[in-house]
Amino acid sequence: MPNLILRLALPSPLRRLFDYLAPAGVSRSALQPGVRLRVPFGRREMIGVLVEVDSQSEVPLDKLKPALELLDAHPPLPAPLFKLCLWTAQYYQHSLGDTLSWALPVLLRQGEPAETRQERYWLASKGASVDDPRLARAPRQRDALKALAQHPHGVAHSLLGQLQLNRDSLQLLHEKGLVRVEVRRTQPHAKPAHWLAQPELPLNAEQRAAVNAVASGWGQFNAFLLAGVTGSGKTEVYLQLIHQCLQAGKQALVLIPEINLGPQTFDRFARRFNARIALLHSAVNDRDRLDAWLAARDGEADIIIGTRSALFTPMKNPGLIIVDEEHDASYKQQEGLRYHARDLALVRAHQEDVPIVLGSATPSLESLHNAHSGRYALLKLTQRAGGASQPRFLRLDVKSRPLDSGISGPMQQAIAQTLAAGQQVLVFLNRRGFAPTLLCHDCGWLSECPRCDARMTVHQRYQELRCHHCGHVEKQPSNCPKCQHVDLRPVGAGTERAEERLALLFPDYPVLRIDRDSTSRKGAMDRLFTTINKGEPCILVGTQMLAKGHHFPRVTLVSILDADGGLFSADFRASERMAQLIVQVAGRAGRAEEPGKVIIQSHLADHPLLVQLTEQGYFAFAEQALSERRSAGLPPFCHLALLRAEAHKPGQAEGFLDEACSEAEHLLGELGLTGIELLGPVPAPMERRAGRFRAQLLLQGNARAPLHRLLNHWLHALEQMPSGRAVRWSLDVDPIDLF
Ligand code: ADP
Ligand code: ZN
Ligand code: ZN
C-alpha cells in the first residue's frame, strides 16, 4: 500500500506546508482537501487544514509524525472560499495556514465541530415517577423531576435557569436514570414568504438609475462605484438591490466599517426585510459568530452584514456584494495578514461572478481612479434625498488669532448663535485626551514616552500621562521630573480640553464628548445618542468616531478645530484622509429641515487643496489630489510594498533590511525585472516604538505583475536569511500607512 502523506497548512508564519502521516485507522476517502486535522507541532498541538494528499515527502518517512485526529467528515470551508484564501495568501505573500486561520471563525480554528449550535435538552425518562423510593429523602430532586415532567418536549439547557430548574438535581436524577438528555440541532428559521416588512421608498431619478444599472447584470461580475453625497440615499439603493437579490433566491453580503455602525445598520435592514440576517462583527461572541458563518454557508441566512473579516464568510448562493463607506481605513487589517477587505471583495465578486457595489460619499482615490479607467462603472448621487440641502463651508483663518483651548473667537460666536437658535453644534477635533503634551515652562522638559519617539498625552481626568502609541501610562507629575519646578503646562488641545473649555464658555448647555475614552464603557454610546436625539440644544465634541454614518438631525453647525495636520504631513495620504474626514463630519450637519454650516479653522486657509475642497467639493478635490499623485508617481499610479523590521538594538533592523535590499537588487537582475525601485532602508518615521527600533524598505513598482514576481522569490530568500531571525519583520502589500 502506498504511503499516505498529508500536506497541511498550519497556522504558522512560515510560508510552506507541513507533511504528516495519516492518523491511524482513517481511510483514504475520508481525507478530502479542506478537512481539519489535529497534529503535533513541537511540544504543542495545532489544527491544520489538509491541502493535498501525496505518496511522497521530502522529509524521510521515519521523521514524519502521524496526525492525531481527523476533525471533519466534510471540508468546513467550501471550495470557492478556499480558492479565495489561496489567492489572498499568494497576493499578500502570507502563509496559507495563517491566512486560513484569519479567515475561519475562532471556534473552527480551535477545532470545534463545524456544526450549527447544538443544544442539550433535559427530559423526564419514560416511567420515571416522583414516588420513586430513591427520591424519598431527596426533596429537591423530587421537585425538579416534577417540574421537568410538565415539559413533555423537554427543556433546553439554556432555559434551566429561567425555569428555576436546578442543574445539580437534574444531574443526580440523570445518574439515577430518571432523567435523560437529548442533543438537538437548533432548527434554522424557515425562509420567509414575503421579503418586505416595510414598503420601499419611491426612488429619485439618480437612485433609480443606480439601481437599474446594477440590476441589469445579475449573475455576472460587474463593479460599481456608488459615489453619493452624504444623505443622498445610498442605503436605500442598497436595500432595493438586496430586495431584488433576495427575490432571485440569492444571498447578499454587506461589509460595513468598524465601530458603532453594526447595530444601526442591522436595525435598518431588519426593519425593511423579513429576512434571516447574520451579523458578524467584533462585538459578536465566538459562538454566535460561528452560527452566523454556518448559516451563511448553508444558505440559511439571506443577508450577511459584517465588518472586515466578514468578507471571508462563505455563501451557498451568493448574489451581491456591497462595501459601504469603501474609503474607510478599517477595511485594511494592520497586523498579521495585512489584507484590504474592499480589494478582496472585488476579487471575490469576480470569482463568484456576482455584481459588487462600492459606496461612499468620499470615495478613495484608488476607486475613483478605477472608475476613470473604466474598471468600475461610476454611479453618482448628487442630491440629498428627502430634500435636505448640502452644508455650506467657511474657512476661518486663525493665523495670528489667539486660540482659547483651540477655539478661536469667531468660532465661539458661531457656536453661541447656533445654541441660541435652539440648535445643536458638533465640534470635531481628531485628538483624544486633554493635551498632546506636557511642558515645563522653566526648563523645557517635555512628557516624552520612555519607550517611543513620541510625547505622552495628558489625560487630566485620570491625572495620567498616556502614550497613544504603546499604551505606556504614568501618573501626571505635579513637579517637573527634571528641574522640580511646578510650572508644568499642557500644550495644545484634545477633546477633553475642548470639552472642559466649552462647558465653561456655555454653562447653560450640555457638552457631550464622544471619543474612544468616553464611550469605552458598555452602553455609554447609546446613552449619549439618547440625549442627542432629544433634540435640545447642546454641544457634541468628538473625534472621528463622530464622522461615521450617524444621523444628527438637529446639528446645524459643524466646527472643525484643526485641519492643518492633513495639509503638511509627511504621509502622502494625509490630505485625502483629512478631506474625507471633513466631508464625512460635515455630512452629519443639517440632515433635516435646517440647512447646515461647516466652519473650518486653519492656519493654511488658502491652501489650494482646502480651497478646492470647500468651494468645489470632494470630487474637485479628488481630481486635484489625483493629478498630484500622478505627477509624483504615487499610488494609484504605482504599486507599493513595504518591508518593515524592528529589533531591540539600534541598527539591527537596518542590518537586516540592508541585506534584504541587496537580495532584491540581485533578484531584479537575475529575473530581468524592470520598473521597480527600492527606496531605503530608512528608519521609520517614529523610529522607536514600544521599546523597539524600527526601519523600513519601500518597493515601488510601475506594474503589479513584476512587483509580485519579485516578492515571490524575495520572500523565500528573506525567510532563509540568518539576520532575519534576530528581528521582527513583516511585508505589507499595498500599505496604506507608511510607518
Ligand atoms: P446615505 O446612505 O447616502 O447617507 P441614506 O440612505 O441614509 O443616505 O438616506 C438619507 C435619508 O434620506 C434617510 O432618512 C432616508 O430615509 C431618506 N431617503 C433616502 N432615499 C429616499 C427617497 N427616495 N425618498 C425620500 N427619502 C429618502
Ligand atoms: Zn523643568
Ligand atoms: Zn510609547
Image: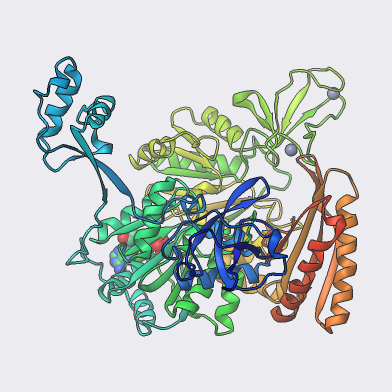
Q: Can residue 327 be seen in this view?
A: no
Quadrant for the C terminus, please: bottom right
- Judged from this view, the residue extending furthest toward the top is 137
Q: Quadrant of residue 707?
A: bottom right
Q: Is residue 573 visible?
A: yes
- Judged from this view, the residue extending furthest toward the front is 1
Vertical side of 610 occupied by 162: above or below: above
Q: What residue is shown at x 21% (from left), y 38% (from top)? A: 180
Q: In which quarter of the image is residue 141?
A: top left
Q: How many labels does the image show?
A: 0
Residue 107 horizontal/vertical position (percent): 46, 50
Vertical side of 201 occupied by 355: above or below: below
| Nearer to the camera, 377 or 651 | 651
Vertical side of 629 occupied by 531: above or below: above
Residue 627 horizontal/vertical position (percent): 69, 76
Quadrant for the N terminus, please: bottom right
Quadrant containing ligand 2 reads top right
Q: What residue is shown at x 54% (from left), y 62% (from top)? A: 49
| Nearer to the camera, 500 or 346 | 346
Q: Does residue 217 appear left or right of residue 679 in this picture?
A: left
Q: What residue is shown at x 34% (from left), y 60% (from top)? A: 295
Residue 472 horizontal/vertical position (percent): 70, 33
Residue 241 horizontal/vertical position (percent): 33, 72
Q: Does residue 718 appear left or right of residue 605 in this picture?
A: right
